[in-house]
Image (spheres, rainbow, N blue to C red):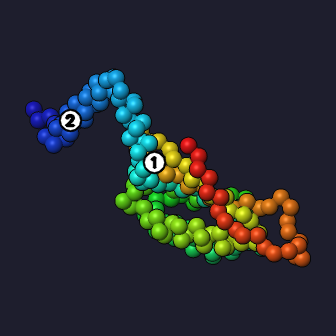
Amino acid sequence: MRERDGAEPATALRQRVAAATDRITSVVSRVPGTAIARSAGRFWQRHARERPDQYQASITFPTAPDQPTVGEIHDWIEALEHAFEGRLDVYARRGRVAVETDRVSAALFDEDEFDALCERIEAGYDGSHSVAHLKKWRRNGDRLVRAHVIVPVKPLFPREEGDGPEPDRTAAGIEAD
């Protein structure tokens, strides 16, 4: 008779530790004041440290003959890929290209490169669009995620050639909780 295939000792130990951790978490979550402590911890992480556990981005690139070329958009997507360690999905839509990134830990995220990319996007759509940049804190389990949504928005009333000086283009840094 053949011997039964059993789990490796390390795997069995991990399963027991995971089960014990779940039981302890369940018991601790019922202790009065735990929710207050978690809320205080999130508040500290958001407003005092200003350092999330993870980052995520969603960017839309409108395409048209008078807007940035496909080559420029490809370069921006490549820079975004470096900032998010290659964890992104690109979708071709009618009249635009959409990019969605996975959540990336703060250790892997390159914030300086992402900020430089945002400036390049604003410069690329200068004159034809305003760039709306929404920054939002989200919870993902016990972690805080800093989500960025960047959308170039075409003005409702296009400017005529002789209407005056160009307005200052700044990203709308909207904080939403």
Q: Quadrant of residue 31?
A: top left
Badge nearest the viewer, 2 or 1: 1
Residue 98 is situated, as x and y percent measured from the top left of the image, at: 63, 58
Decide if residue 1 is on the left or right side of residue 164.
Answer: left
Q: Is residue 21 left or right of residue 131?
A: left
Q: Amino acid at mark 2?
A: Val
Dot 2 and dot 1 residues touching (CB under 8 Å): no
Task: State whether residue 49 is above or below residue 119.
Answer: above
- Residue 22 rendering spot, x and y as whole percentages: 28, 30
- Which mark, residue 141? none
Residue at 20% in and 35% down: 17
Question: Cα distance, mark 2 to mark 1?
Answer: 31 Å
Q: Taking the image as drawn, is residue 74 in sight?
A: no
Q: Which numbered marker is on residue 46?
A: 1
Q: Is residue 21 left or right of residue 173?
A: left
- Residue at 58 percent of width and 50 percent of height: 175
The percent coordinates of residue 121 (x first, y second) are 63, 69
Give whichever of 57, 51 is nearer the camera. Answer: 51
Query: Would residue 134 appear left or right of 35 to someone viewing this image?
Result: right
* Residue in the picture at 83% in, 58% down: 156
Kindly identify which residue carries mark 2: 17
Q: Position of residue 75 (x, y in %)?
A: 57, 74
Q: Secondary structure at mark 2?
A: helix
Q: Is residue 72 above or below residue 37?
A: below
Q: Is residue 16 visible?
A: yes
SS for callout 1? helix
Viewport quadrant of the C terminus: top right
